[in-house]
Amino acid sequence: MHPMKKAKKLTIIVAIGLLTVSCSNVEKLLKSNDYEAKYAAAMRYYEENSFSKAIQLFENLTLHYRGKENAENIAWYYAQSLYKEKDYYTAAYQFKRFARQFPYSDRVEEAAFLSAYCRYIDSPPYTLDQRLTREAIEEFETFAERWPRSNHIPEANRYLDEMRVKLMKKDYEIAYGYYFIEEYSAAYESLKNFLSLYPEAPMREDAMFYLLRSGYLFAIGSREEKQRERLQQVVNDFDRFSSSFSNSKYLAEAQDIYTRTRTALANLESDEAAGADRQ
């Protein structure tokens, strides 16, 4: 065997042997009742960046040290180990739990921030369910209320802005989705709510146009006794749209909807007048 290959093989064998011994040591410690040795080993593994081993030991120590001297340290480094191992979902839970269990700790502010930050990291793209995004926003808002002078406030505000944009995109996607599948009543209500909730949204022009079109299609498909009221609402929506976006790319189509709406209203008035004459 070539000397280089032999040396490489030996290195791999040694590494596997050390890993096996290390894992064996952790397993022995987990079964042991020597909690001081477990604690010392957990701290050593943490300092050596062996977070997966530290997690096992800190988790094992949590119940034994509840209410005792090292309880705070164990809870803190357990959460930190999870965070550094990139298990953000569990880390968020443990940081939040730390803040509840040790409200007078000098680490409580950092724990509250990291709990929210872990939720932020786990927040998915706007096309997916936004439950974690909403949880992260709620935690950052609570953090800002409790520690308004924290050094983390500028950072927290950046994350909040980013996540609010994500929610805005999600809400628009849902509202437009109703229009796309021709659920015009639901589209109209969702777009109206969107425009109320996000008055400065960059897609406001699109939202107002699809509101106008949804309202018109909903109105002409309505029962006769509901049409006049709903068609009049379309006229009002057109007035708002045209005054807000006088140079809109949708203006020609919007004006066509307006003309059709006026014609439909005139026909309703004509039919009502004819009916009154027959009586």
Image: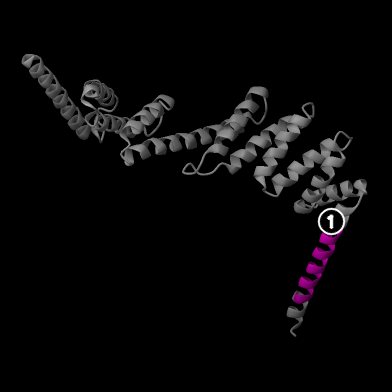
> Is residue 235 or residue 231 the one in the foreground?
231
Magenta stretch, main secondary structure, is helix
Q: Which residues are magenta?
A: 9-25
- The picture places residue 151, in percent across and down from the top left corner, at 67, 29
Q: Mark 1, residues whose alpha carbon is within 10 Å: few (<14), some, or many (≥20)?
A: some
- The picture places residue 158, in percent across and down from the top left corner, at 56, 33
Q: Magenta stretch containing residue 21, yes or no?
A: yes
* Residue 97, picture quadrant: top right
* Image: 1 above or below 123: below
Horizontal side of residue 76 vs 181, given as left or right = right
**What residue is drawn where x is 82% and y is 47%?**
60
- The picture places residue 1, in percent across and down from the top left corner, at 75, 85
Horizontal side of residue 71 vs 235, given as left or right = right
- The picture places residue 138, in percent across and down from the top left corner, at 59, 30
**What residue is drawn where x is 36% and y is 28%?**
189
- Total numbered labels placed on residues in the image: 1
**What residue is drawn where x is 14% and y is 22%?**
268
Q: Magenta stretch containing residue 271, yes or no?
A: no
Q: Is residue 148 visible?
A: no
**What residue is drawn where x is 59% and y is 43%?**
122
Residue named by callout 1: 26
